[in-house]
């Protein structure tokens, strides 16, 4: 089968217009890769008939709640509903492991995570590096201008003979150009329509000035805020929506 990507959530942190928060599953036929895990993760996966037990790899772009806040619920699922029988790699920026467990313990302090913790392997992704997380998966990371104290990442995932680039949350950076060049699919955030003062997110007005410099085979806008949704007829670039399935 051709790899396909399922959009679990194309919404922003505010779940604008009722959209689920960040999450994407890449299914290569041989493995399933989750990119970002918003708090609506389990609801969106189960609504679409995707089993958390089938995940082989989780990639987290940054440590804002709408991008990793679903991990405690994933751990809870593995504790009580579908016990994890094999290793799951969770890769992302520094502090992902300690923040995930701290969040889980705040939410479910009486749960014993001993058994599930043995099945979870956390891996740090450093900007500017290429990481082989599996014999069939290569991840290239860049640092994006979204957070200052913590590192936020954009990815390029090569798996199943295809490439998927993902901006994560970011203001405009020229590093997105080589990251997405020649990619089969580029998921690019577009939170605002025109907010030049908010440099930690990309606005559509700015993105369209850079569109000619981006050369993926397919560009898809995501992490879409209310301003963009309200002006959807003016958007000349394809937009993602919850439940969308894309043949990569």
Image (tube, grey):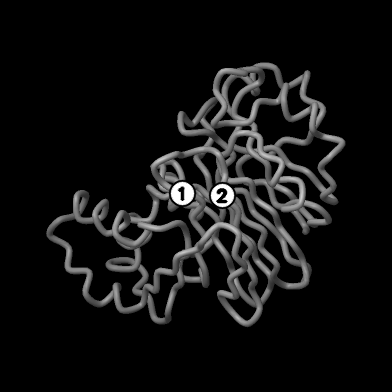
Q: Is residue 246 above or below residue 196?
A: below
Local packing at callout 2 (Cα closer than 10 Å; few below 14, some 14-19, many 20+) is many
Contact check, label 2 and label 1, Cβ < 8 Å: yes
Q: Is residue 28 above or below residue 184?
A: below
* Quadrant where the C terminus is found in the figure: bottom right
Q: Position of residue 155 (x, y in %)?
A: 62, 56
Q: Quadrant of residue 191?
A: top right
* Quadrant where the N terminus is found in the figure: bottom right
Question: In the rendered image, which residue does mark 1 sit on?
Answer: 151
The mark total stands at 2
Q: Is residue 54 above or below residue 203?
A: below
Secondary element at image label 2:
strand
Secondary element at image label 1:
loop
* 111 with respect to 146 (left or right): left
* 235 with respect to 148 (left or right): right
Identify the mark nearer the N-term, 2 or 1: 2
Which residue: 15% across, 56% down? 109
Residue extending furthest left? 110
Q: Position of residue 221 (x, y in %)?
A: 70, 37
* 248 with respect to 142 (left or right): right
Q: CA distance from mark 2 to mark 1?
A: 7 Å
- Viewer-proximal residue, 29 or 63? 63
Q: Position of residue 73 (x, y in %)?
A: 34, 55
């Amino acid at each position: 089968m051709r790899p396909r990507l399922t959009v679990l959530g194309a919404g922003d942190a505010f779940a604008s217009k009722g959209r689920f928060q960040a999450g994407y599953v890449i299914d290569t036929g041989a493995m399933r890769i989750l990119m970002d895990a918003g708090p609506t993760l389990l609801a969106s996966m189960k609504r679409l008939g995707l089993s958390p037990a089938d995940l082989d790899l989780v990639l987290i772009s940054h440590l804002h709640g709408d991008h990793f806040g679903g991990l405690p619920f994933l751990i809870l699922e593995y504790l009580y509903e579908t016990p994890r029988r094999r290793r799951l790699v969770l890769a992302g920026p520094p502090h992902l492991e300690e923040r995930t467990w701290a969040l889980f313990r705040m939410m479910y302090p009486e749960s014993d995570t001993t058994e599930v913790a043995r099945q979870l392997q956390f891996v740090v992704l450093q900007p500017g590096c290429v990481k082989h997380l599996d014999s069939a998966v290569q991840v290239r990371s860049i640092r994006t201008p979204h957070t200052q104290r913590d590192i936020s990442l954009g990815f390029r995932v090569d798996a199943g003979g295809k490439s998927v680039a993902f901006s994560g949350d970011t203001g405009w950076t020229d590093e997105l150009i080589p990251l997405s060049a020649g990619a089969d699919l580029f998921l690019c955030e577009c939170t605002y329509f025109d907010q030049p003062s908010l440099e930690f997110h990309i606005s559509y007005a700015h993105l369209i000035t850079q569109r000619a410099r981006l050369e993926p085979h397919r560009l898809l806008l995501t992490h879409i805020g209310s301003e963009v949704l309200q002006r959807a007829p003016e958007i000349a670039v394809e937009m993602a929506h919850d439940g969308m399935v894309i043949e990569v």
